[in-house]
Amino acid sequence: MTEHTPTPWHMDGLYVTNKEPPTVGPSIADCGRSPRIGRAEQVANAAHIVKCVNAFPKLIAVLENVKQLSDCKLSRQMAEDVIRDVKDVSKP
């Protein structure tokens, strides 16, 4: 399976990139392509993608800790379920 573009990702206007702005060259995502979405929402979408991608490793680490350290069986099971679901999404 091909790995995703290395993180951290950055926002450069309506573009998502792994280079510090201003960027020249290819981007990961262009959030300004849809004429049916206003510019403010396009910018918000780009920012949301960057925040989610950059937070992902820390969130998985927290879930791994919950799974291993929690005294609550339900919390451990929920953490395990989310980790499994994320791993399933990343499969080709």
Image: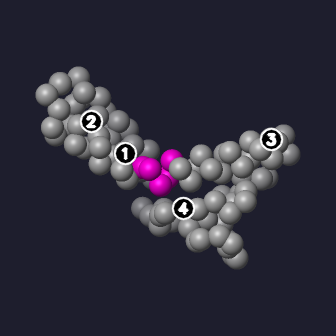
Residue shown at the point (66%, 45%) measured from the top left:
45
Magenta residue span: 52-56
Is tag 3's residue or tag 4's residue first in the polypeptide sequence? 4
Q: What's under tag 4, amino acid-wise?
A: Trp
Q: Mark 2 belongs to which amino acid? A: Glu
Residue type beneath disc 3: Ile
Residue placed at 73% from the left, 60% from the top?
A: 13
**Mark 1 or mark 3, which has the lower sequence index?**
3
Prevailing secondary structure of the magenta residues = helix
- Residue that carries the numbered disc 1 in the rendered image: 59
Q: What element carries label 4?
A: loop
Residue occupying image coordinates x 73% and y 57%: 14
Name the spot of residue 7 as percent of width and height, x first. Answer: 47, 64
For residue 36, above or below residue 78: below
Alpha carbons under labels 1 and 2: distance apart: 13 Å
For label 3, the residue is 37
Q: Which of marks 4 and 2 is nearer the N terminus?
A: 4
Q: In this view, does 15 lie above or below 23?
A: above
**Where is mark 4, residue-wise?**
9
